[in-house]
Amino acid sequence: MAVSRIEVPGSAAEVASAVASWQGQVAVGGGRYSMGGQIGVKGGLHLDMRRLNQLVWIRPEARTVRVQVGMRWRDLQDVLDPLGLAVKIMQSYSKFTVGGSVSVNCHGRYVGLGPIGHSVRSLQLVTADGSVLEVGPKQRPELFAAAIGGYGAVGVITEVELDVVPNVRIERRVRQVSLEGYADFFRQSVLADSTAVLHNADLLPPDFDAPVSVTWHRADDGKPLTEKSRLVPRGASYALEQNAIFVMTEVPGGTRLREKVVHPMLMRPPAVKWLNHEASLDAAELEPRTRAMSTYVLQEYFIPDLGFIPFARAMAALLRRRDVEVLNISIRHSPADRVSALPWARQEVFSFVLYYKQRTWRSAQERVGRWTRELIDLALEQGGRYYLPYQLHATASQFIRAYPEAEHLRRLKGAVDPQGKFSNELWRRYL
């Protein structure tokens, strides 16, 4: 996608000046991990926010921190860890920027906490006329709600104030459960356990019918660490992980190799570490060796409790029928979103995160689009939704069915951005 101009602002004032002086459309980008043009608009101005990456202040006694939006989680962890603190809610990997995470209303594996919006206290927001506003739950709450998970629709987030929590020792507990019994197991053995900190369950190809529950619980202070490092070292080599993924997706029988050998080998040893270490994983371990012929892609679907089993069964059958090269499906959980104007969890949901291999040529992309729309229909049939940061395969009618709140966002955007200055390829298509 070709933009007309790229600006790299170093302050909120520079953002405001760039927005106010630009006559066309403006899009905002951070770590550049979104997959469907959510950070750019054709022929428009692209604001690269990565130079806005400084700590504004930290108040350990109040367990809150304020940062500029271009700061990456890994850089914030360097600030928090010496103080015995940790990020409250973030993704499983630490290379994302804080602003990008808030703009997509990310979530992670944090038990009972839900989307990142639940940990945001306030935002600094630049609007279409160049105003720099402070917004929060009690101060301009409609703008606050529209900015969180709003993909830049109503303004440019320049600072974020977040809750933080104590860093704790955690230990891993792995258990195989039945698909039919997983939801009850999660509620009784994970959600109801006050020591549970992080949780996901892995569904492995080709059957996707035997969840492997992975829960990290608070460990006793006296329990010895199996991992001495407090944070994942920067710049590590992940050649072994990249080669393993290549083998599992390219060699005949590779899917069974993961199910029978690789996954049990990774999960069997006892593990006790700091929360910050598990939260500072590097997304480089997911990178392909080359993107000349293929890449690895994510999708995510949010399904209410009653639809869990029907969706899981139908999804597995569809993936097998369409010969989708899925490496893993991770199951997470979220309570209802009580903040965002465009919630992906309007009620309690289980999320299904698909991590799959995709060829790079056009016919392969079109094929992915077809089975993706089928998956979206399956989610909608169960009262669920799909996540928006990924490739723009959904039809306009699917988007409207999944996110009927978009009409309210459209009206609010019309009031604060009447010329439609803020846009990107996601909103050009759907909003």
Image (spheres, rainbow, N blue to C red):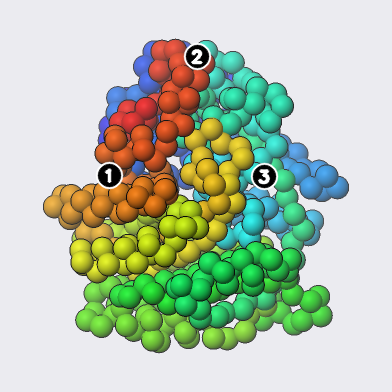
Q: Position of residue 77 (x, y in %)?
A: 66, 55
Which residue does the image show at 53% across and 32% down from the upper left? 341
Residue 393 circle label: 1
Which residue does the image show at 45% across and 52% down from the upper left? 302
For the residue labelled by badge 1, is the local secondary structure a helix, a strand or a loop?
loop
Residue at the right extreme?
61
Cα distance between the residues tagged 2 and 1: 29 Å
Verify CB contact (< 8 Å) between mark 2 and mark 3: no
Which of the two labelled residues, at mark 2 and mark 1, occupies the earlier sequence position? 1
Q: Horizontally, is 3 left or right of 80 in the view?
A: left
In depth, the one of 282 and 333 nearer the eye is 333
Question: Mark 3 packing: few (<14 Cα in 10 Å), some, or many (20+)?
Answer: many
Cα distance between the residues tagged 2 and 3: 27 Å
Question: Mark 2 packing: few (<14 Cα in 10 Å), some, or many (20+)?
Answer: few
Q: Horizontally, is 114 left or right of 378 in the view?
A: right
Residue at image mark 3: 119
**Amino acid on which disc 3 is placed:** Ser
